[in-house]
Image: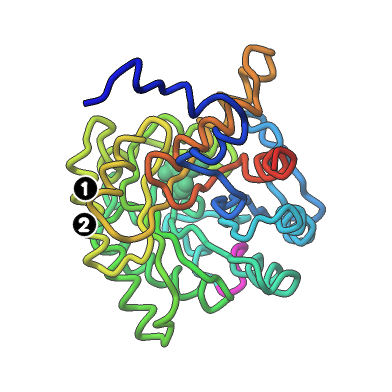
Amino acid sequence: MATYPKHRMRRLRNNAAIRKITQETSLSVNDFIYPIFVTYGKGVQDSIEAMPGISRVSIDNLGAEVHKAYDLGIQAILLFGIPESKDSLGSDSYNPNGIIQLAIKEIRQNLPDILIITDVCMCEYTDHGHCGITESGSVNNDKTLDILAKISVSHVQAGSDIVAPSAMMDGQVAAIRSSLDQNGYIESPIMAYSAKYASGFYGPFREAAMSAPSYGDRQTYQLDTANTREAMEEIRLDVEEGADIIMVKPALAYLDVISAAKSKFMLPIASYNVSGEYSMIKAAAQNGWIDEKRIALEILTSIKRAGADMIITYYAKEAAQWLAKTD
Ligand code: PBG
């Protein structure tokens, strides 16, 4: 093996052009999916304290919100709905006139080309905040599957392009695939939150979506943060059940899981750069402790480098602007 002085690694670092041409990973606006929180009411633009720059918006403000992202070159959004009333069965989640169904229609009218991805879960719709139907304090897996399938069909009926089940119920991808197919939606892809960890990084999101569980936690359905093989098995099952895109979530503390998934599976991989990851950078930046732009782009690049083909990130709009300027 050749060594120094014949080999000098610094030769390829000498100027910007040579660094650019040898760069292994590149980040682009095409990689981003921008999450949006839609809420009931009129004229609402409620900023979320722990997520500076991110708000809950009502449907009448949604067109403008989505336009801003679209005009920056962002081609995909991920929608979360916050209904006016919650009940134990989360019934607003599959209401044809529910918050998310109306939001989808509104966006479709405004921007027919944008890719609309919708989160399929019950926690924003249930009064107990769990991701499924509860019975004597625990989530009943199989009863929840029927609801998740109903939610998915109602989203696609309203115009959603991709449904993204995030409830972490066993068999959810199979249940959704078969319901979509039975209803004729054979071409609608499923982006499966396959390896979704029981993470502390979702804290700010739960404030934003008002979806914190009123008792207990999500450890009986989300993954143990210490495990990788369990994640590979979750992904394998989702692939076999018919997932089209698989997801690792959160991103930053799970780069090894993204990398392992990349080498084992051939489907596109999404990774969710979640609320807590966003809040940490924002908080440090507001204190003047870090260079926000540099750190946010470094982190997004690391998620891509680990193997993600697409990144769901609250930084999508800012990063799109930063990337447009440096190009
Ligand atoms: C719904 C859902 C959650 C997130 C996305 N979908 C919250 C949770 O599981 O508690 C978190 C996203 C984020 O933190 O940005 N189940």
Q: Nearer the viewer, residue 70 or 148?
A: 70
Question: Which residue is denoted by mark 1 in the rendering?
Answer: 232
Question: For the view shown, which residue lies furthest in the front direction?
Answer: 6
Q: Relative to 131, does residue 314 appear above or below in the rendering?
A: above
Q: Relative to 153, does residue 43 appear above or below in the rendering?
A: above
The reply to whether dot 2 and dot 1 touch (C-beta < 8 Å) is: yes
Question: Marks 2 and 1, Cα distance to the nearest angstrom?
Answer: 6 Å
Q: Nearer the viewer, residue 151 or 15?
A: 15
Mark 2: amino acid: Arg
Query: Which contiguous range is marked in magenta?
Result: 96-100
- Which picture quadrant has residue 281? top right
Q: Is residue 89 left or right of residue 51?
A: left
Number of marks present in the image shown: 2
Q: Position of residue 301 (x, y in %)?
A: 50, 37
Mark 1: amino acid: Met
Which numbered disc covers residue 310? none
Q: Secondary structure at mark 1?
A: helix
Residue 177 appears in the figure = yes
Q: How is the image coloured?
A: rainbow
Residue at the location (21% across, 66% down)? 240
Q: Secondary structure at mark 2?
A: helix
Residue 237 on the magenta span = no
Question: Which residue is denoted by mark 2 in the rendering?
Answer: 236
Residue 98 on the magenta span = yes
Q: Position of residue 296 (x, y in %)?
A: 58, 31
